[in-house]
Amino acid sequence: MARRKKIYEGKAKTLYEGPEPGTIIQYFKDDATAFNAEKKAVIEGKGVLNNMLSEYFMTGLNTIGVPTHFIKRINMREQLVRACEMVPLEVIVRNFAAGSMAKRLGMDEGTQLPRPIVEYCLKDDKLGDPLVTEEHIAAFGWASQQDMDDILSLALRVNDFLSGVMFGVGIRLVDFKIEIGRVYDGDFQRLIVADEISPDSCRLWDIATGRKLDKDVFRRDLGSLTDAYTEVATRLGVMPKGATPMVRPTLIN
Ligand code: UDP
């Protein structure tokens, strides 16, 4: 059998050429990194949980008419997605102050924001993904004004959807990051939600206790990351109660 072609290996996922032109297979690894990969670990089961959770969120978004790259899950660690040209930005939406914004503006973590705040960072590991303004984005041509209008609208729709879904299972969506891809349908281009949506890229706090159920558990050494992600997956019904995400990586040929 032909060895399948690796397109890209990132920190948490590897991308392979998909079975049809215009498709990609996303393989979710167990690798966890933080602080621009200064802190690293392999956390057994993380890839399986993120694959299932990202499927859950992306499918929900597709169902309510927010376009995403997700096509279908293939197995415990892989999903088939639509290939797209990535917009070189991280789009962050915040409902409560936390992380870098709390630090930058001297706010207490957990302070409710007067309205959702959308921020943009340039995707560039060497520079540590610096915060950029719409002026930079327009001047350097990373996205057009029309793209930015579409990105803002997508980001806010994703925020409303995810906030509601999480609220329904007793979890506060503090903030999250999405990435946006460009696809071409004939002569038309469209922007869609790409990459992944998982507790690796969100801040999720239990509403009753404040317990962190996201990657801050790893960043700040707060206990078992797998337990935290399993709690999210179980509440959403993505993992049956008592199921274990500890399956061995699928063999890749
Ligand atoms: N985030 C992410 N990838 C990044 C940077 C941030 O997924 O490279 C997510 C992060 O998990 C959080 C939100 O974006 O949910 C806001 O992150 P923040 O800017 O506070 O950065 P951090 O404190 O994580 O460095």
Image (cartoon, rainbow, N blue to C red):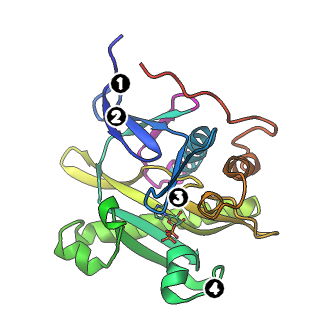
Magenta span of residues = 62-76
Q: Does 169 sit left or right of 157 as displayed?
A: right
Question: For the residue labelled by badge 1, is the local secondary structure a helix, a strand or a loop?
Answer: loop
Q: Could you give the CA–CA distance between mark 4 and mark 2, rounded to whole angstroms? A: 43 Å
Q: Position of residue 178 (x, y in %)?
A: 45, 60
Question: For the residue labelled by badge 4, is the local secondary structure a helix, a strand or a loop?
Answer: loop
- Name the disc covering residue 23, or none: 2
Binning the other alpha carbons within 10 Å of mark 2 as few (below 14), some (14 to 19) or many (20 upward) gives: some
Q: Nearer the viewer, residue 4 or 113?
A: 4
Q: Quadrant of the N terminus?
A: top left
Question: Which residue is pictured at 30% across the width and 46% down the height?
Answer: 84
Binning the other alpha carbons within 10 Å of mark 1 as few (below 14), some (14 to 19) or many (20 upward) gives: few
Amino acid type, mark 1: Pro
Binning the other alpha carbons within 10 Å of mark 4 as few (below 14), some (14 to 19) or many (20 upward) gives: some
Judging by the rendered image, the residue that carries numbered circle 4 is 108
The mark lying in front, picked from 2 and 3, is: 3
The mark lying in front, picked from 4 and 3, is: 4
Q: Could you give the CA–CA distance between mark 2 and mark 1, rounded to whole angstroms? A: 7 Å
Amino acid type, mark 4: Asp
Question: Which residue is pictured at 60% across the width and 55% down the height?
Answer: 199
Is the residue 252 above or below the residue 149 in the image? above
